[in-house]
Image (cartoon, helix red, strand yellow):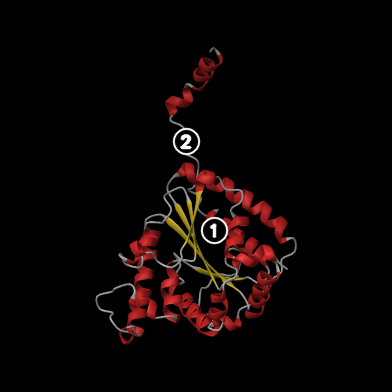
Amino acid sequence: MKDITSDSYKVTSKINLKDLNTKVVIKKADKKLEDVREKLGKLQDTMYAHNKYAVLVCLQGMDTSGKDSLIREVFKEFNARGVVVHSFKVPTELELGHDYLWRHYIALPERGKFGVFNRTHYENVLVTRVHPGYILGENIPTVNTLEAIDEAFWDTRFEQINNFEKHIAENGTIIFKFFLNLSKKEQKDRLLRRLEKQEKNWKFSPGDLKERKLWDAYQTCYEDAINRTSKPHAPWYAIPADDKDSARYIVAKIMYDTLKKYTDIQEPELDDAIKENLALYKKELESE
């Protein structure tokens, strides 16, 4: 197939997930990934020295969609100081003592670094929308019953998320949002492998099967969230996830192609006074 571009999977108009392909097989995707992730690693070094932009990579997808292994493979060539991964699970007591975006704000990457959110602030309009009872645990003053969690509530929450992303984008964070679009059949196969292979048993939870029964509800919520929040400054990319090698390459290629467009990202120039005396500094060291 023709190689992808940074816009190949970008959501720029309303989508229907049922119409999107969940499997694309790219020839020699694993080899192509090796090349792109090395380039990404070098680019991150430059961004670290430049110290003007941060990069936020958001990964969402159904259970078994490949988020963990994608992080491992795509960021393999990064300097450890240049990338920080956060996996957001059930909110802690401390986190519930703040508004729902607080734990995401404090995890944002600093300038010069990549931050990866493995599950993201979108859990607050996905899992909580499928299980609205979780919202009651947030102790929001105006939300004391399930009846209060109506469409107006979700409209407001989407507006807050859009504002959150607009704010950080305007202050130098480059945002990538990847939805790993997995088919229900492929999820079944991956769950079966977790049960059949002893070394993968630890990944399995009976809760995975309970959530699988809610597949259609999750797909509806994902579709709505993507359509409401894919913006030019914070676009969603719907990545076919049934073939892991291809999905990893597509994600890496999109990030690299996009970041290369930032022509202002350059290593800083040495101060003229230092440049003029490089030979002197070298001589001083060699004479020790």
Please indicate whether residue 150 sits to the left or right of residue 267 in the image: left
Whole-percent x, y for residue 203 in the image? 60, 66
Residue nearest the observer in this picture, 281 or 102: 102
What's the distance in space between the residues labelled 1 and 2, CA to CA?
A: 24 Å
In the image, what residue occupies the spot 51% across and 47% down?
Answer: 82
Whole-percent x, y for residue 183 in the image? 63, 78
Could you say whether the residue bearing mark 1 is in a helix, strand or loop?
A: helix
**139 above or below 264?**
below
Residue nearest the observer in this picture, 89 or 243: 89
| Residue 22 in view of the camera | no
In the image, what residue occupies the spot 54% across and 58% down?
Answer: 258
Which residue has dot 1 on it? 258
| Amino acid carrying mark 2 in the image | Glu
Which residue has dot 2 on it? 269
| Amino acid carrying mark 1 in the image | Thr
Around disc 1, counting alpha carbons within 10 Å, would you say few (fewer than 14), some (14 to 19), or many (20 or more)? Answer: some
